[in-house]
Amino acid sequence: MNTIHREQLVNQLHWRYATKRFDPQRKISAEDWAVLEEALVLTPSSFGLQPWKVIVVTDPAVKEKLVPVSWGQRQPADCSHLVVFAIKMNLGEAEIDAFLKRTAEVRNVPLESLGEYRDMMVGSLVKGMDDATRKAWVERQVYIAVGNFLTSAALLGIDACPMEGIEPGKYNEILGLDKLGLSAIVVAAAGYRAAGDKYATLKKVRFPKEQVILHI
Amino acid sequence: MNTIHREQLVNQLHWRYATKRFDPQRKISAEDWAVLEEALVLTPSSFGLQPWKVIVVTDPAVKEKLVPVSWGQRQPADCSHLVVFAIKMNLGEAEIDAFLKRTAEVRNVPLESLGEYRDMMVGSLVKGMDDATRKAWVERQVYIAVGNFLTSAALLGIDACPMEGIEPGKYNEILGLDKLGLSAIVVAAAGYRAAGDKYATLKKVRFPKEQVILHI
């Protein structure tokens, strides 16, 4: 156990904001980035299935190409690391089996011992859902990773901007995701705020706690 | 700035797991819980719209009632605080206007100055989406809150179990959510692991980092 202080969580969640202007000169250190990648890998998901991949874009030319397909917003180019959250398309028995193989490997148990778990996942995800429902389920899972990433970055003092305003089809094309069976869903630009970003000092808007949280 | 150490993030994300058995005797302190509620309120969302509410259930009788509508799992009853993430049904202009009113209030700006922002949100969410697409969008937003909550709890040393295995309709009935225009989507039981939870010591299964994260 290596817990943090309550004030750290509150302070850093107040400190973060959807950064509009990044300082293009400031890069996230290799040490910090390695930890954020580990945090991404450790993101929880339903069944533990991790139905996503994450593409980290740091190539300046590619980042620049993503600006016009991000509603012209500069964050993809000016940030330090652009994180593209992509779903595995056509999630099915092959992905479930890959996950079970990994489980058997990590936990050193025979694959056959996981048969019941396999049946449950296949029943729920493959047989129990049509394609559109399954895709929506996978997309929701990805947003757990987004939430985890934004909080993790804030706690390390790293700025981020989650962005839904992208053209996924164009992202897939530019990043070559189609041929990997992936599709971009949402991105988070990460780095450091520019000194003059006026959004940094705007008061954070949230509904009052008593309107957000009900007690029973 | 009140950042944490890199090792704290990694250690606590390794420490957490989907807790199967909670110690029913151990309750989260009022101080810790207040901070987790604040973290929930501070969750980011697209446009800042916060299209959700969170129902915190601590009444033992109600928690017990939720067990049979949670596939018989005991976590809702045995945990300290059960967090039910619910979406606002029929998100539309009224919710956008409530958010803009709040923005004007918090930032002390005239409501009229937010007209362009209103047009953008109405264009994107109300006119630009059919009901099913909008509901799916709202549901994805809620999962940001789930990701934030799980990471926040882990960092404070509080156990949690995210659960999709619930009957939302029954949750809505038991918690009276329908009449509030809400619908339960996913829950997270929070508290402390029971000493004998065998899942606590199982090795965490994740795909190797190089399979999860691609670099461009």
Image (cartoon, coloured by chain):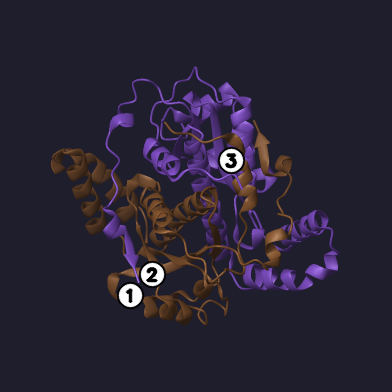
Chain colours: A brown, B purple
Crowding at dot 3, Cα within 10 Å, few <14 / some 14-19 / many 20+, comes out as some
Crowding at dot 2, Cα within 10 Å, few <14 / some 14-19 / many 20+, comes out as many
Q: Earlier in the sequence, mark 2 or mark 3?
A: 3
Q: Residue at x 47, y 80 (%)?
A: A64
Please state the chain letter of the residue tagged with numbered disc 1 in the rendered image: A
Q: Which mark is residue A178?
A: 1
User: Can you give x and y, in whole percent of width and height, for residue A22 in the image?
Assistant: 57, 68
Say whether marks 1 and 2 touch (CB < 8 Å). Answer: yes
Q: Residue at x 24, y 46 (%)?
A: A118
What is the three-letter code of the residue carrying label 3?
Answer: Gln
Q: Which mark is residue B187?
A: none
Q: Earlier in the sequence, mark 3 or mark 1?
A: 3
* Marks 3 and 1 share the same chain: yes
Q: Is residue A160 above or below residue B191?
A: below
Please state the chain letter of the residue tagged with numbered disc 3 in the rendered image: A
Q: Earlier in the sequence, mark 1 or mark 2?
A: 1
Residue A203 makes an appearance in the image: yes
User: Can you give x and y, in whole percent of width and height, for residue B81 in the image?
Assistant: 55, 30
Q: Is residue A209 above or below residue B125?
A: above
What is the three-letter code of the residue carrying label 1?
Answer: Asp
**SS for callout 3:** helix
Q: Please indicate whether residue B189 sits to the left or right of residue A31 in the image.
A: right
**SS for callout 2:** strand
* Marks 1 and 2 share the same chain: yes
Q: Is residue B13 above or below residue A22?
A: above
What is the three-letter code of the residue carrying label 2?
Answer: Ser
Q: Is residue A174 above or below residue B150?
A: below
Measure the C-alpha gap from mark 2 to mark 3: 35 Å
User: Can you give x and y, in whole percent of width and height, for residue B163 in the image?
Assistant: 44, 40
**Residue placed most toward the observer, A156 or B49:** A156
Q: Which residue is mark 3?
A: A8
**Residue placed most toward the observer, A134 or B5:** B5
